[in-house]
Image (cartoon, helix red, strand yellow):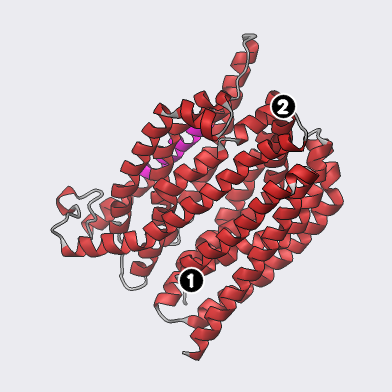
Amino acid sequence: MKSKTKHPLIVGTFILTVTGVISRLIGFLYRIYLSRVFGEEGMGIYQLLSPVLSLSFSLTAAGYQTAISKLVAEAAATRKHPSLRPLAAGLSISLPLSLLCNAGLFFYADFISAALLREPRTASMLRILSFSVPFAAVHSCINGYFYGIKKAGIPAAAQLLEQVTRVGCVYIVSSWFLSQGRELSINVAVLGLTAGELFSMFLTMAAISPHGRFLSRKGQGTGLLCPRRLPGPSNASSRVLYGKLLSMAVPLTANRIVLNFLQSIESVSIPTQLRGFGYDNATALSVYGVFTGMAMPFIYFPNALTSAVAVLLLPIISENFALGNMDAVKKATVRTIKYCGLMGLCCMSAFVLLGRWAGTTLFDSPLAGYFITTLGFICPFLYLDTTLSSILQGLGLAGHIFAINVICLLVRLGFVFLAIPRFGIAGYLWGLLASQLSLGILYLGCLNRFLKKAHKT
């Protein structure tokens, strides 16, 4: 009697989706707690750190995680046992970069807060945030290995532990401060973020250790746990490995940095342009905080499912593409578009009908309700774009993804600088809708052209 093999995409998607839903539910309640404890202006100040966090992650980890996942998946298609060599190589680059970034953020926090974020109150927050960068780099690279071998359990557990630690830390510290009658600072939220990254790193490091011992016993030493076989400059196979890793990671990193740089300009400019519309500084930060700290996380909540699919699609598409199995690639693509599009339409209906009620009831903010209702219209494209990007990544079309994202970000920036001073935050919402629609159309067009060309050859 044959044993039934569970499809890794289905199993992995289920694991990541369940964990993602739980994590996002915790995060959603956490946002409500933060908004009530620190207020709308405090949320606005906290959200100003997002560009810095995104840029740091892009520089030190994002490209290496994806490259590790892709290399491990390709190796797994032709080898009996998975290899940790891509992880060792990725960490040897990612970790030093993250430590440099840590030092830069810590020592130049005053300059970054005043000159770039235009909010001096973020300086102390940046110093705390800087220590999260190395932690995030290590556990992101290890996650890349587990995604590559289609084992989603460890990244899912790390994500959940990170969220629980973050919320628990903030709640405990906040409760202690309030019980002592002391003034509570939004710095507490950044402390929780850093603690979450630290515990997540410990979990993934503990999880990878048995893999290293197993491979060492099988004679597949990787350098992580077998020092005598560390990849060095004189090792030809190691040079090939580093060449492959960097050829994937560097363009991805450069693309992510450019994109996050543009997103940073967008994030920092929204409060500034709102002041140009006529708001004072406190009101501008409050509107920004409601939009980015309350409405957007609510809209992204169902994205737990599509994000899980996207993460696991990358190694599956990469593996089948490497084997020349284009039928499997097409089948996965069609199913993804079908189900993610349907989910987006259902979510759009729910947000449009119930958005105002949700904003008023959950966040005690009618403005949040207005944002949720308006942003509901981007759902069909938002959820679909996440998975389409992963498919294109797996097919080696990172350059196309970069160009498309730059175009759509420039569309949004145009609305930030031209529409917000005239129409307020409504002008930015129009730009977001136009940008997301353009992104979906361009992704679909790029994918359609590639599949047609592959079919002809």
Give the camera-side residue of 255 and 63.
255
Q: Residue furthest top?
A: 181
Q: Would residue 407 be found to the left or right of residue 362 on screen?
A: left
Asked where in the image residue 340 lies, by quadrant, the reply is: bottom right
Instruction: Give amino acid for label 2.
Output: Ala
Give the extent of the magenta segment: 193-206
Instruction: Give amino acid for label 1.
Output: Ile
Residue receiving disc 1: 317
Q: Are marks 1 and 2 in contact (CB under 8 Å)?
A: no
Instruction: Give the CA distance from mark 1 to mark 2.
Output: 47 Å
Residue receiving disc 2: 282
Badge 1 density bin: few <14, some 14–19, many ≥20, Cα 10 Å: many
- Helix, strand or loop under label 2: helix
Residue at x-position 43% and y-position 55% = 254
- Helix, strand or loop under label 1: helix
Residue at x-position 64% and y-position 49% = 21
Residue 161 visible in the current orientation:
no
Whether residue 199 is situated above or below residue 72 in the rendered picture = above
Residue 361 colored in magenta in the image: no
Whole-percent x, y for residue 277 in the image: 76, 38
Query: Which secondary structure class fits the magenta region best?
Result: helix
Q: Would residue 275 be found to the left or right of residue 356 on screen?
A: left
Badge 2 density bin: few <14, some 14–19, many ≥20, Cα 10 Å: some
Give the camera-side residue of 374 and 146.
374
Whole-percent x, y for residue 407 in the image: 59, 61
Whether residue 160 is situated above or below residue 346 in the rendered picture = above
Q: Mark on residue 209?
A: none
Asked where in the image residue 441 lies, by quadrant, the reply is: bottom right
Q: Would residue 454 be found to the left or right of residue 376 on screen?
A: left
